[in-house]
Image: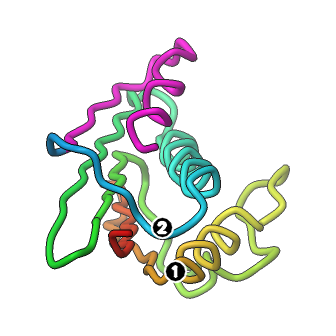
Amino acid sequence: MLKRTIDLFEASGTTTRLSCHIPPGNYHVEGDAKLIGRIINNLIINGMQSVPEGRVPEIVIRMSVENGRVLIAVKDNGEGVPEGIRTKIFTPNFSTKTSGSGLGLAIAKRGIEHAGGRLWYRTKTGFGSIFYIELPLA
């Protein structure tokens, strides 16, 4: 599912530098594969949109497996999450975009938690963010 999501994204012809580090083997996690794919796609798009004009967007996706759980990290080189909104980004209907619904991260968090996982992030103003998805192996 992760590889398929990345392949579709790369085929779109974007100028974003996308690198992916996935360990060999097939890993199956709890949860709706289509929803998880959409969540990862959404994190990639959010990361791209956070990059200021004049900077080439770079997205790095890493996956690791440990203690019966899969950890996926989606890192961008954007502006980072501003301090004043860090506690709000998973709140339904909250958006920093004029055209956004504010549902993407709220749905993502709920979907990952429903599958028995966690979604969280770390950010550094001016340097970007890393969003983490942790899910139990099926």
- In this view of the protein, which residue sits in the foreground, 82 or 33? 33
Q: Position of residue 106 (x, y in %)?
A: 68, 74
Give the left or right position of residue 19, taking residue 8 as reference: left
- Report which quarter residue 24 is drawn in: top left
Residue 81 has which mark? 2
**Which quarter of the figure has residue 3?**
top left
Asked if 9 appears above or below 132 in the picture, the reply is above
Residue at the image point whose x is 48% and y is 67% from the top: 81
Q: Which residues are magenta?
A: 1-22
Q: Is residue 62 above or below residue 9?
A: below
Residue 136 belongs to the span the image colors magenta: no
Marks 2/1 in contact by CB < 8 Å: the verdict is yes
**Number of other residues with Cα within 10 Å of mark 2, as a class: few under 14, some 14 to 19, many 20 or more:** many
Please indicate whether residue 121 sits to the left or right of residue 19 in the image: right
Q: Is residue 35 left or right of residue 76?
A: right
- Residue at image x 80%, y 55%? 100
Q: Which residue is mark 1?
A: 86
